Amino acid sequence: TASEAILSVNNIEVIYDHVILVLKGVSLTVSKGGIVALLGANGAGKTTTLKAISNLLRAERGEVTKGSIEFKGERVDRMTPNELVRRGCIQVMEGRHCFGHLSIEENLLTGAFTRRDGGAAIKRDLEMVYSYFPRLRQRKNSMAGYTSGGEQQMCAIGRAMMSRPSMILLDEPSMGLAPQVVEEIFEIVKDLNTKEGVSFLLAEQNTNMALRYATYGYILETGRVVMDGDAAHLRENEDVKEFYLGVT
Ligand code: ATP
């Protein structure tokens, strides 16, 4: 029901550069405490959907031209990304985007930028992040640019956690990483979900891995949701098996 939803995207259309129609009416719901997978091939519109929610489209000359987006029961379509972060919804962008010339710890601290509470709380949250990501604690003084791809992905998620989010929009965390590193990261995502109560919308091309951790999934094809269902149900679906599970 609607009262259980933390995020609902209602029939949104997205156009780039005033003419390129990329999302053709996408609807999805993330229930409070859920991990929802947004699946589909390269170019299907996963990143565009996440950026539409977090209001990062403007920088790409994109615009939501139809539909509405609600977070915690409030319309958020016209908010700035920072306003959304203050309300508890933050995106971790594809490609990790750590500051390469800053240490891991300095990167994590940049994640606290929207907060108005003091240093003690931020210090406590740094400890919270290190407790989930022991590798980041080990590497806290290393320049992020010299750490591994997996550590940089952890740093990006850890930095998002420093804003004390109730929801993370996570774009393609598996990209370019070895399977065991992907698994390590997904296990931490599951921990953050169960222990910190963070809801996740997870865009992934790695269907197999995503459906092992998600509770529910949506499949996008050229800007439309073509299928959705419980993760267990999608894993058993013949079309999903043929078109998405065989290839990853
Ligand atoms: P990927 O895995 O590559 O991120 P995706 O499913 O996230 O794929 P999007 O990045 O959302 O897909 O792209 C969806 C479509 O929108 C693609 O056809 C892409 O070429 C197009 N597109 C993305 N960004 C822009 C832009 N700034 N201007 C014009 N078209 C764009």
Image (tube, helix red, strand yellow):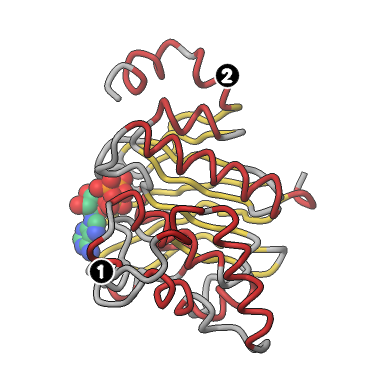
Q: Which mark is residue 197?
A: none
Amino acid beneath label 1: His
Q: Earlier in the sequence, mark 1 or mark 2?
A: 1
Please identify the quadrant where the C terminus is shown.
top left
Is the distance from the Cβ of mark 1 to the nearest ligand 1 atom less than 8 Å? no
What is the x, y in percent for residue 27?
A: 53, 47
Q: Is residue 7 left or right of residue 169?
A: right
Which quadrant of the structure image shows residue 48?
bottom left
Relative height, residue 60 to residue 214 (above, below): below
Relative height, residue 148 to residue 123 (above, below): above
Secondary element at tag 1: loop
Relative height, residue 119 to residue 232 (above, below): below
User: Which residue has dot 1 on it?
Assistant: 18
- For label 1, count other residues whose C-alpha is less than 10 Å away and answer few (under 14), some (14-19) or many (20+): few
Choose between 172 and 186: the one closer to the eye: 186
Marks 1 and 2 sit apart, C-alpha to C-alpha, by 38 Å
Amino acid beneath label 2: His
What is the x, y in percent for residue 148?
A: 27, 53
- Of badges 1 and 2, the one in the foreground is 2
Residue 19 at least partly seen: no
Residue 139 at least partly seen: yes
Residue at position x 43%, y 63% in the image: 52
Q: How many numbered dots are placed on residues in this image? A: 2
Residue at position x 56%, y 70% in the image: 162
Residue at position x 57%, y 53% in the image: 132
User: Which residue has dot 2 on it?
Assistant: 233
